[in-house]
């Protein structure tokens, strides 16, 4: 599942990079929790929670139904 998550993040990353940020995959747990690190401008942006939940988490859940949630670490 980790490889699938990486592929989806690769499709999201260009949008984040256009705003000066990025996302790094930290871990995927056996119970479907994806742990990511928002970097660059995304790491300190007040809208990062929305980016995480409404952007990254939503796209991952659409592409990989086994994903339960996405957490920033």
Image: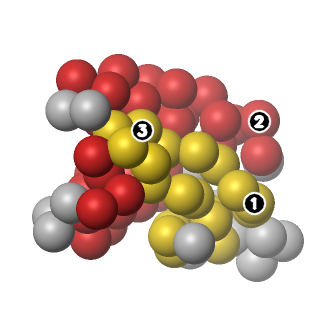
Residue at 33%, 39% in the rendered image: 21
Q: Position of residue 32 (x, y in %)?
A: 69, 70
Mark with earlier residue (3, 1): 3
* Residue 58 seen from this side: no
What numbered label is drawn on residue 3? 2
Q: Position of residue 10 (x, y in %)?
A: 52, 26
Mark 2: which secondary structure?
helix
Quarter the C terminus occupies: bottom right
What numbered label is drawn on residue 27? 1
Q: In the rendered view, would you say 46 is above or below 64?
A: below
Q: Residue furthest right?
A: 30
| Mark 2, other Cα within 10 Å: few <14 / some 14–19 / many ≥20 | few
Q: Position of residue 19 (x, y in %)?
A: 19, 32
In this rendering, which labeled residue sits more in front, label 3 or label 1? 3
Which quadrant of the figure has residue 53? bottom left
Q: Decide if residue 47 is on the left or right side of residue 54.
A: left
Q: Nearer the viewer, residue 23 or 60?
A: 23
């Amino acid at each position: 599942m980790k490889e699938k998550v990486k592929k989806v993040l690769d499709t999201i990353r260009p949008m984040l990079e256009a705003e000066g940020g990025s996302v790094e995959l930290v871990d995927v747990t056996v119970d479907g929790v994806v742990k990511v690190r928002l970097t660059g401008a995304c790491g300190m942006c007040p809208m990062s929670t929305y980016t995480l939940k409404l952007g990254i988490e939503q796209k991952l859940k659409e592409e990989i139904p086994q994903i339960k949630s996405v957490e920033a670490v």
